[in-house]
Amino acid sequence: MKRTALAALLSHWRYHPLQLVTLVLGLALATALWSGVQAINAEARASYDRAAQAVGGTRPVITGESGGITRDQYVSLRRAGWQVTPLIEGWIDGGQGRIRLIGIDPLTAPTDMTGGTTVAEGFDLTAFLSGSGQILTSPATANRITSTDLPPVVTVEDLGPGLALTDIGTAQRLLEAPGRIDRLIVRDTQPLTRTPLSEIAPDLELSASGGTADLARLTDSFHLNLTAFGLLSFAVGLFIVHGAIGLAFEQRRALFRTLRALGVPANSLTGLMIMELVMLALLSGLLGVILGYAIAAALIPDVAATLRGLYGVPVEGALSLRPVWWAAGIGISILGALAAAAGVIWKVARLPVLAPARPRAWAMATGSTILYQAAGAALLAIIAVLMGMFGTGLIAGFTMLGALLIAAALLLPAILSLILSLAARFAQGPIAEWFWADTRQQIPGLSLALMALLLALATNIGVGTMVSSFRLTFTGWLDQRLASELYVTARDEAEAAELIEWLRPRTDAILPIWNVDGQVAGAPAEIFGVADHTTYRDNWPLLSSLPDVWDRVADGTGILINEQLARREDLSPGDSLAMPDGWEPTISGVYSDYGNPLAQVLISVEELTMRFPDVERLNFGLRLPPDQVDPLTEALVTEFGLPEENTIDQISIKRFSLEVFDRTFLVSGALNVLTLAVAGFAILTSLLTLASMRLPQLAPAWALGMTRAQLAGLELIRALALALLTALLAIPVGLLLAWVLLAVINVEAFGWRLPMHLFPANWLVLALLALLAAGLAGLWPSIRLSRLQPATLLKVFSHER
Amino acid sequence: MSVRAWITILMLAASAGSAGAQGFADLGSEADGFAIPQRGVPFEFPRDHGAHPDYRIEWWYVTATLTGEDGRDYGVQWTLFRSALAPAETNDWNSPQIWMGHAGLTTPEEHFVAERLARGGIGQAGVTAQPFSAWIDEWVLQGPTLSNVNMRAQGTDFSYDLTLSTDRPFVPQGDRGYSVKSREGQASYYYSQPFYEVTGTLSLPDGPIRVSGNAWLDREWSSQPLSENQTGWDWFSLAFDDGARLMGFLLRERDGASFSSATWITADGTPTPYPDGAFQARPLTTAEVAGRDIPVRWQVTLPDRDLDVTVSALNPQSWMDTSFAYWEGPVRFEGSHAGRGYLEMTGYE
């Protein structure tokens, strides 16, 4: 009995293959976008973990007060029972960009710092430990090492991306830091007794490690952005599923009644419906995961580039397949399908045995539904405002964003309905009046699809506005910040001195760009020294400052901090800030510093060299007439003998920075297009659904003398009109979204606020895109209508209604 | 396989039987550049108590058979291995000398193990002859001379602190310290101090225990002591109730044959070496230890001394679960003679 009933239920799909395709494709798309984004996030996080593992993971660390630890201190600790292992970190030139070099002592390092490193062929322990050295990297990183000045590279599979692992002795040599140990990693197991650290080396400090957390916190906002996108796409996909399942329910009312009349209990019928749904969801989920994998694989190189460029976080540009990911994808597909079908299943369970068999005007919704939706929208809007006023943190920001978007979507039918009734009031002639009234009557049926379109368009406008505003600000900021025409780096201090002498007659000014890393306000910060020069006075992008800000910096009483630090610690000009060596200068200004995840402090170069005598004095910015840049660059290489890679001109840096920037938001762009495509598909399915049900409404119009071609034309115009109206409404929603992104999310995520710029040309393009999507979606039902057999229309009158 | 495992393998542990393995602990490989032991070179103390970096491998190996104030038997092991990647030493991280420490503590029910690794050149591990000090991390074997030393080591769940002293001489093994290890002539320098008196404290999870007893030191260095077809060894050190000592070992070969060697040491420290074949050891009972069958009861005979005893492990599960694993633990024996000793078995798969 059950099998027969299930066969009867399933036969529906055989007669309505398009509905099946819609359902499966909708669910698959939703799953694909969601799981694709999850895959990207998981891959990136796994990369962070691997990277963190190589430097000791989450184990506690011991650091020195002034940064370094001596070999003797290390040995004293070991000889006092401390199971610690030394680590040195730095950057080397791999020939094609910098590689993060990590020097370890493999004899004392925990196994996970060097592995499960699978040792490949060519690994020679003697060479690694005591010979000329060997460097271990992942195969992808190995491809980026072309420099011949480095020890032989051996590839190992499990090493984090962008990392080179080598023996501490080799690392000290390559980093030109003989004897240096950056920190000691405290191993998980320690022996019974240890002499307290304070008795062995009082100036060393034991602290909990940031480990993975640092990288994760740094990139949280980025991943949250992606997750939000994935969630949005999933929601849009569920609109499609909801539509398809609703339609299948209405069309099978007769079947349900027959089955119930034949003795199938309501419970069994409900169970069978769920079983059917789960089967379809499994199929769609599988398809979706495969699709999602394809999406993720296509996007991850850009994500990797973004994370490298924007945050300096290495992520492998390749995707690995994780079983948990398959399970999650299929799981979310089933959950999504059940959520979308919950209403329908509820109805089936309560269906009276002798329910009327004819499809109730499924699409019909009463005015009260629209009112409920509007009330829901108002509630959500209140939540959004409350979040904006009282919430803090990224989660609050995104909650606010979500509430605003859903509120806008829920309000859409009410507003459209209002506009259409106004239009009907001003309509001339019976056809126009019928057109507007009929359009309005269709709003409930199309509302889900239109909401999806609204969300997609608003997201597009919002994200587009944010990205374009950011880019405009960023470009302007680059112009200010990169005032020097040429940047040079000497190879050592002796060369730096020669370089200054050599450059002095050839340039207008030589500006030192020297910095040290230190802890400021409890977090890592960069401390830069700047010369007292008009270059800074004229160009530096100050957001707020005390009077005579540059004089204060020059005489050593004042410092400048970046916006990130100011926002994080709630500092403003006039406050004082504790610097690493106990110095407490006054903050005399705050400047914008886009793209930098770290806190930054600017002090006068005299203060820097006095307070941090060990600072590396190798980098300089050069001021000179723009037409002298190329000749001087060439002379630096040919006459002075500086390697070419040690000079970079302003134009190249700007181009590189903008490239990084553009790549960063390529992913957003791709996801935007995908959500729009999903919304277009939602419109198509809704229109197709409505087309088959609307015959009773169209037949009288046809009987009154309208041709099928006229009716089809009107159908198409209706789709376009609704899309246009939705697009117009999406603009204010999108701008609101942009504002939240720029003024709330960005501040929370990155620590900077961006001015908002408007780009009406983009809106036009989007509106056209929306029309195109709606036009394409409306074309098919219209063409079908224009080719409809007159007999079919006639039957409407002879049938039961 | 991790880098760390590689290190250990390169250092000591090429498990017998695996393809291309050259005998247990890689001792069978060629000498390339390392010094080779020569017959007839007398020891020079205290210099030879220190390290010999020109040789590939060397160890300071102490085993102690102890009795607690609770009347129970205990065993303690303290070992420092030196293994050189090249016959040289530097004063920095580039040192080719690798050090490994093993500590063991055996009770009738439990067996505690700890392991340490270090490289030479930086002071984390090493040996000086005068005053004597051998150390790796906080583990030490040190005193004014090697005849009077303090021995300490600890793991996560145990520690010991023992005083070892003796007035008797160091005893050369084999031919005046030239100990032949195979019919092909591979050999090592080898001397022992089998007469230490021991007092001290063991720290166990249940609390500290005062102990006393005897200890035995083995010093050995070489560059190629194992023959290529030798897969492992069974090494016995037995202390007789009358004060005499016996060192005997069996080097097992791939074809089932073995090469044996032994030294009878009288209570005043006079050694009598025995050539291949004189000393015999035959497994009587095996136990499943760490997933393999290991003989834990042996019949040991040395007919020339009318010795025929049954040697039994105090704790059959005396498994040294270190980077290269082996069995090492205290034993008791009875039969023609009685007493206590230590047994080491390597190369069991």
Image: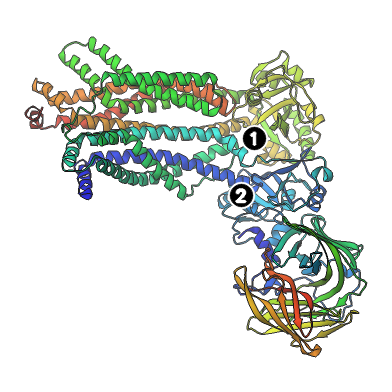
Q: Residue at x 71, y 62 (%)?
A: B112
Chain for disc number 2: A
- Left or right: residue A700 compared with residue A272: left
Q: Is disc 2 in contact with disc 1, using a CB cutoff of under 8 Å?
A: no
Q: Residue at x 7, y 31 (%)?
A: A791
SS for tag 1?
Answer: strand
Q: In this view of the protein, can residue B60 be seen by the observer?
A: no
Instruction: Tell me the quarter of the image containing the C terminus of chain A.
Output: top left
**Above or below, comparing residue A229 to residue B332 in the picture:** above
Which circle marks residue A145 in the picture? 2
Foreground of the two, A226 or A13: A13
Q: 10 Å neighbourhood of mark 1: few (<14), some, or many (≥20)?
A: some
Q: Which of the 4 image quadrants contains residue A439? A: top left
Upstream in the sequence, badge 2 or badge 1?
2
Which circle marks residue A648 in the picture? 1
**Above or below, comparing residue B320 to residue A424 in the picture:** below
Residue B276 percent location from the top left of the image: 75, 86
Q: Amino acid at mark 2?
A: Ile
